[in-house]
Amino acid sequence: MDITKTGSFIAELRREQGLTQRKLAEIIGVTDKAVSKWERGLSYPDIVILPKLAEVLGVSEGEILRGERRSENAEPQEVSEAMDYARGEISRNKKTVIRIVMIAVGFLAALAVIICSVCDVGLGGGGWSLYTSLSISLGTAVALGALSGIEKGSPVRSALASLSILIIPYLIAMQLVSHAPVAKIGVPCAVLALAYLWASYFISKKFRDRKGTMLGIIFALAIPLDLLINLTVYLLVAEPDHEFIWDVISCVVLAIASACCFLSQKSEYKGGGRER
């Protein structure tokens, strides 16, 4: 499709019908500026109004998209072009919606930071707004990463990538603000958690058609994660009264959940085999 050719064709047909840009716009329910953009080759008519436009101009939708009147045996080509056009419109509309949502998320995050800062100063300047501002910034960055990934079909991967890049700077900043060993304890735990999240992501991609197996592996991997994080915290904090019984209980629960998922997948597979 040639956008300039289509625009010239629309202008030609409009004049043949004795219509001004404003009159055509009124008939099909758009602005005269939109019609002007079509005729100057700056944009295509929206797919929703294309049938009405074609009806008013006395041609087919495919003829408008091609920018010329139909030749013999041209209908299959018109259908193909119409489908390409529809997919392009859906993609453009999707990008527009994503951009609007991203702007809204950024605006709301900035507004939240400002409100927290004002409230902090108004209540005596305790400095708590720094913690919330850092947390809001991290959450917003991860959310924007997920939104940007929707267009590419990988929102989870984009969100994980954003989190992986920003979590350690976030923990270091929190330690500088709070003067507490946030990074000392948080960084090793964050590295372990990120490794688990990335492993879970790739496992979910590999076993997407075998939900039981996927969940079974993810629950099983959570057992060493739980033990390693608890051990890390125990060594760094040197907590003398740490009750290991809760570590054992959580590992047993995760093991049971993993076994149940594997068994459910096995029974589902056998059931499917009997049906076949």
Image: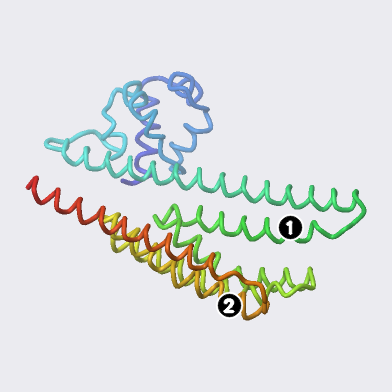
Amino acid under disc 1: Ser
Would residue 269 be found to the left or right of residue 92 on screen?
left
Identify which residue, 184 or 238, lies in the foreground.
238
Residue 150 drawn at (x, y percent): 44, 52
Q: Mark 2 points at which residue?
A: 232
Label 2: few (<14), some (14–19) or many (≥20) C-alpha neighbours in 10 Å: some
Which residue lies at the image location 58% right of the left edge and 77% below the top edge? 232
Q: In this view, does 16 lie above or below 133?
A: above
Residue 223 drawn at (x, y percent): 44, 68
The image quadrant of residue 166 is bottom right
Q: Give the number of marks.
A: 2
Q: Nearer the viewer, mark 2 or mark 1?
A: 2
Identify which residue, 148 or 87, lies in the foreground.
148
The Cα–Cα distance between marks 2 and 1, rounded to whole angstroms, is 28 Å
Label 1: few (<14), some (14–19) or many (≥20) C-alpha neighbours in 10 Å: some
Residue 146 drawn at (x, y percent): 50, 55
| Residue 34: mark | none
Question: Marks 1 and 2: in contact by CB < 8 Å?
Answer: no
- Asked which secondary structure carries label 2, the reply is helix
Amino acid under disc 2: Thr
Which residue lies at the image location 68% right of the left edge and 46% below the top edge? 108
Would residue 248 be found to the left or right of residue 211 on screen?
right
Residue 89 drawn at (x, y percent): 39, 41
Q: Mark 1 points at which residue?
A: 133
Q: In this view, does 85 lie above or below 17?
A: below
Identify which residue, 53 or 17, lies in the foreground.
53
